[in-house]
Amino acid sequence: MPMKPILTIPDFMPLSAEQRAWLQGYYAGMAMQAEMSVSAGAGLSSFAVDILIGTQTGNAEGLAEEMAMTLGGAGAQARMHQLDDVEMDALAEMENVLVIASTYGEGEMPDNAHLFWEALEAE
Ligand SMILES: Cc1cc2nc3c(=O)[nH]c(=O)nc-3n(C[C@H](O)[C@H](O)[C@H](O)COP(=O)(O)O)c2cc1C
């Protein structure tokens, strides 16, 4: 589906170059969002996303569930996995991967991510 032309800002508008650039970007974002909501449902039907979750107390999992619902509502297939359940062979087969993980202390990973990280780091 062709993109609709993005609204241009008339030259006579009393804007600085920076303001003009910001507004142009804002319009572009609005146009893209509108385009995505029109194509949702049909456009994403062959799109699959694997959501990998790293969580200690469940917040990341809650976010992942929301994301899966949003993707599902747009016609995509979303599959959720706990990070430690993901084998490297399976990871290699995944086309689109979204990792949602919390951090603790000095940016440390949650407990259910350690095995995944070790496997990822291994040769
Ligand atoms: C003891 C403790 C340490 C934390 N340390 C960090 C941190 O270093 N950096 C950070 O961004 N968030 C930190 N947080 C915030 C958690 O990442 C945040 O609560 C997150 O939502 C937890 O998600 P989860 O329930 O999926 O594990 C910390 C939270 C706790 C309770």
Image: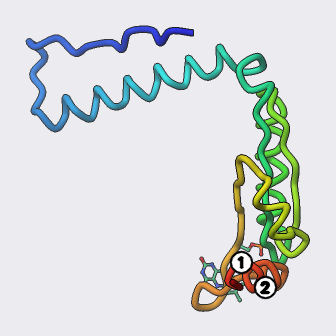
Picture residue at 78% right of the left edge, 20% below the top: 41
Residue at 71 percent across and 69 percent down: it is: 101
Q: Is residue 119 left or right of residue 26?
A: right
Give the residue furthest to the right.
85
Q: Earlier in the sequence, mark 1 or mark 2?
A: 2
Q: Residues within 10 Å of mark 2 (few under 14, many from 20)?
A: some
In the picture, which quadrant includes the N terminus? top right
Is the shortest distance between ligand 1 and the CB of mark 1 under 8 Å?
A: no
User: Split into 4 quadrants, where in the image is the C terminus?
Assistant: bottom right
Q: Is mark 2 within 8 Å of ligand 1?
A: no
Relative image position of residue 39 (x, y in whole percent) = 67, 16
42 above or below 112?
above
Residue 53, placed above or below residue 15: below
Measured in 3D between alpha carbons, the distance from the residue under mark 1 to the one under mark 2, in whole angstroms, is 10 Å
* Amino acid tagged 1: Leu
Q: At which x and y percent is residue 75? A: 81, 26
The residue carrying mark 1 is 120
Q: How crowded is the residue under tag 1: few (<14 C-alpha within 10 Å), some, or many (20+)? A: few
* Scheme of colours in the image: rainbow
Q: Quadrant of ligand 1?
A: bottom right
At x 16% / y 38%, what residue is drawn?
18
Residue that numbered label 2 is attached to: 114
- What's under tag 2, amino acid-wise? His
Q: Quadrant of residue 70?
A: top right
Which residue is outermost to the bottom? 105
Give left or right: position of 74 versus 4.
right
Residue 13 position, x and y percent, is 13, 16
Q: What residue is shown at x 79% (from left), y 54% (from top)? A: 93
Secondary structure under tag 2 reads helix
Indicate left or right for 11 with 64 as reference. left
Q: Position of residue 15 (x, y in %)?
A: 12, 27
Observer-nearest residue: 89 or 24?
89
